Image (cartoon, rainbow, N blue to C red):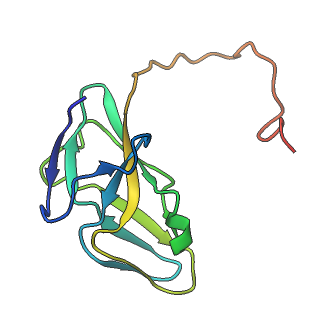
């Protein structure tokens, strides 16, 4: 699948797969940003892109991000297929859970993305779903 992408700083690489078996493309931070302790900050990821019709972009933290004292503030990012304008630069919304500021430097990889298909649904309200209750969250584990 070929995706149209606009890079803001051409001195940095395009998002790329880290290995042949990688599922997601790593994103490179465009400019240094300091995320203050117990605060949220934004890391610009140096690209805008146009997903194919019927697809969306799921932006997620790289698995090593927590080692820096950072996590995605919103869990994951869901970018709709119409978030595709020339100025719609992708950003990682980062939360610093430490007691010290964390510097994220230009060229660092803090996020990754995959492009996934989706289906639109129609909701049909009913009075019962006709299935037995499971007992709530976490009922099959310890």
**Which residue lies most toward the bottom here?**
100
Residue shown at 81% from the left, 28% from the top: 134
Residue shown at 32% from the left, 56% from the top: 27
Q: Residue 137 occupies which quadrant of the picture?
A: top right
Do we see residue 129 in this rendering?
yes
**Which residue lies most toward the front here?**
20
Q: Is residue 126 above or below residue 6?
A: above
The quarter of the picture where the N terminus appears is top left
On the image, the x and y values in percent for residue 131 come to 76, 16
On the image, the x and y values in percent for residue 65 come to 50, 65
Q: Name the residue nearer the viewer: 94 or 6.
A: 6
Q: Residue 24 occupies which quadrant of the picture?
A: top left
Q: Is residue 103 above or below residue 141?
A: below
On the image, the x and y values in percent for residue 26 come to 36, 53
Do we see residue 58 in this rendering?
no
Residue shown at 40% from the left, 47% from the top: 19
């Amino acid at each position: 699948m070929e995706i149209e992408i606009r890079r803001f700083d051409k001195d940095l690489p395009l998002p790329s797969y880290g290995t042949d078996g990688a599922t997601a493309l790593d994103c490179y931070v465009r400019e240094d940003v300091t995320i203050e302790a117990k605060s949220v900050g934004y890391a610009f990821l140096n690209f805008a892109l146009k997903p194919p019709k019927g697809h969306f972009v799921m932006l997620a933290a790289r698995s090593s991000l927590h080692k820096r004292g950072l996590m995605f503030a919103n869990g994951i990012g869901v970018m709709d297929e119409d978030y595709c304008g020339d100025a719609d630069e992708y950003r990682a919304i980062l939360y610093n859970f430490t007691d010290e500021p964390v510097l994220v430097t230009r060229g660092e990889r803090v996020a990754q993305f995959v492009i996934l298909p989706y289906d639109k649904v129609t909701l049909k309200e009913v009075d019962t779903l006709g299935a037995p209750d499971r007992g709530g969250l976490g009922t099959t584990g310890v």
